[in-house]
Image (tube, coloured by chain):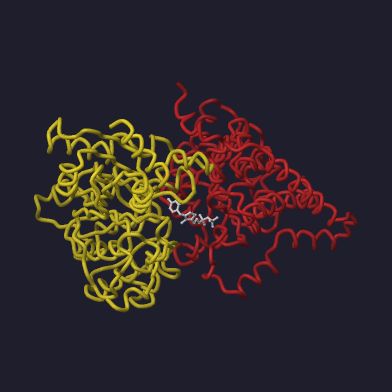
Chain colours: A red, B yellow
Amino acid sequence: MTSLFEHFKAMARLRAFDEACLDGFHKGEIHGELHTGIGQEAIAAGMIPSLEAGDALVSTHRNHMHGLAKGVDAHALMAEIFHRETGLCRGRGGHMHPFDLGQNFSATGIVGASLPVALGYAYAFWMEGRANVGIGITGDGGANAGAFHECLNIAGAWKLPFVVVVENNAYAISVPIRHVLATPTIAERAAAYGAPGWRVDGTDPEAVAEAFARAMEHARAGRGPAIVEATCQRFQGHYEGDHDSYRSRDEKRRMKAEHDPLAITRRKLVAAGDATDLDAILAAAKAEMAGILERVRGEPRPDAADALRYRFAS
Amino acid sequence: MATANIRNLNCSQVIAEAIGLEMERDPRILVLGEDVGRIGGVFGATRGLQERFGDKRVRDMPISEMAFTGMGVGLALAGYRPIIEIMFADFVGVCLEQVYNAMAKIPYMSGGTVRMPMVVKTAGGCIGSAAQHSQCLWGLFAHLPGMKVVVPGNPYDYKGLMASALTSDDPVVYIEHQSQMGKKATTFRAGAVVPAERYTVPIGQAAVVRSGRDLTIVTLSACVEHALEAAETLAGEGIDAEVIDLRGLVPLDMATVCASLARTSRLLVVDEDYVSFGLSGEIVARAVEELGPTALRQVARHANPDVPVPAAAALEQAVLPGPASIAAAARRMAARS
Ligand SMILES: Cc1ncc(C[n+]2csc(CCOP(=O)(O)OP(=O)(O)O)c2C)c(N)n1
């Protein structure tokens, strides 16, 4: 079992990655938008222990942490976010559209569109009799797209190895999820698909890891789909530059004070008598990601003359 | 009009003002869309409307475009005049079914017995968000029969065309340009003055926004401002360009375009949408049909060369029209004439 300390280390890297992106963004180095997962690290971290190289993960507009959890190279991902030729997609995709075939990882900027693609992987694994799983990530908001129902119904009907992870950060941009859900939770919809569903505290990496491990075992064993709903808070605005006027100052203060997965995990480690220098772990993660950003800064951007390349294979 | 100059609203405020005036006038108008209520839209084009008209008439929807676009159809059948906001034009992919098989076809399929007074309001165009958040897609809507397609390019038209869309008994797709939503009225070369009172701009009428003798630049949306800027540069080089703002695709005002071409006989179509099988080809084809195959001395198109909009800024610039590339296209024509 992954120790809480290992989870902390993983979360430190995830946060440092997005903080490096923020640094570059606010220096005007990223053309376009940026969505970060800061505050939601425990979910990606909790998935790491159950992800195998052969599994496939399809994520959303808020995808960096899922990519890193799946094993995507941090440099190649960051170079893509900063639109460099050295990026995963040679700077053509950008931060919402990273594709790493080697790691079976991809994402989409269209909300709700991640799940069907993950289901395609699940169908392939099922046909091939492979013990791999297609994992689709969605936010709470994306769970209200019709594709959520369509995919889980198909997976339930044919017992496809399909796991849906819902990052429930309580908002879809400005819309509070409780205003637009027919049921108190998203996990309870699992009953409609003959699937198990778990709702867990998504600021607790151990709770996420346990539920995700159960979901993955279920799917890997050929028993069909499962849903893991992990509750969390998004610390930044929906995108960088979002006025975020829909959340009160007090709500945002409490969210950071009470729902920070790194701070919570740190308190637990200290209470359990862990003597490791946790500041050193954070500093090492920061240094690693700052180093990657420095390297990316020196790398070439795509040349305008190549704008028409890569449209067709032949 | 005296106060209009100093109001200096941005385009999203102008649109909100237009919708507010229509909602006051007609209680059957409602607005359904993501984030349209509490924050008044991600671009601010419905700001303040929920406070004024309540959360039944201005409603924040879940991310369920297929459902709420279809609801628009049902509401229209039930006697309402819904505005359905699809946040970015790209997302119409999720609900195109309700747009083109229901909204657009029902008036005809019903033998004219059913009217579909519904507005699909969406934002197209590029502000640097790559392939899935930068498309114009007006050519797509225009290709599918049954919808009027309105594409304003300045503050005056944003307001007046929204008023017309909301009084139309036909389904209207109203496409804003993302880059113009936060842009102040006074920064526009055309249509900068926006009266506070209600007025309409007729759907299907192009506007000559600059007169010139040497060539006709036909365009729409944000490219109108780009073309006007290019025309200023070109004027200094002895090229006198006429600029026509189409203000929409359906119906297409070819009379204005052809009247201009009869004088200049040189046509440059500038379109931020994809070049093939779309607006620019349509303009050329209709000009040839209407004026005859020998009437035009030169024809050129400057549009997205059929590439998904790339993330990197240099690549994006290379595939989208801007003031410099429009001027360059006109210069190439001049050099060949
Ligand atoms: C089909 C579609 N509709 C709307 C959007 C615009 N949009 C982008 S993210 C977002 C909110 C997503 O909320 P959620 O799924 O909860 O994810 P979160 O951003 O909270 O991580 C919306 C409405 C989109 N990208 N795609």
Vertical position of residue A41 compared to residue B53: above or below: above
- Indicate the position of residue A155 as horizontal and vertical percent values: 48, 40
Toward which corner of the image does residue B200 lie, by quadrant? bottom left
Toward which corner of the image does residue B12 lie, by quadrant? bottom left
Q: Residue furthest right?
A: A275
Q: Is residue B19 left or right of residue A144?
A: left
- Residue A182 seen in this snapshot: no
Instruction: Say which residue appears at 49% left-offset and 43% top-offset.
Output: A115
Q: Nearer the viewer, residue B213 or B151?
A: B213
Quadrant of the rendering where the C terminus of chain B is positioned: top left
Toward which corner of the image does residue B282 lie, by quadrant? top left
- Indicate the position of residue B189 as horizontal and vertical percent values: 35, 59
Q: Residue furthest top?
A: A314
Q: Nearer the viewer, residue B34 or B131?
A: B131
- Residue A216 seen in this snapshot: yes
Vertical position of residue B171 compared to residue A64: above or below: below
Q: Is residue B234 left or right of residue B210?
A: right
Quadrant of the rendering where the N terminus of chain B is positioned: bottom left
Instruction: Say which residue appears at 22% left-offset and 66% top-offset.
Output: B80
Instruction: Say which residue appears at 34% left-offset and 73% top-offset.
Output: B5
Total labels: the figure holds 0
- Indicate the position of residue B174 as horizontal and vertical percent values: 29, 56
Q: Is residue A309 left or right of residue B58?
A: right
Vertical position of residue B285 compared to residue B205: above or below: above
Instruction: Say which residue appears at 79% left-offset and 49% top-offset.
Output: A287
- Indicate the position of residue A187 as horizontal and vertical percent values: 54, 55
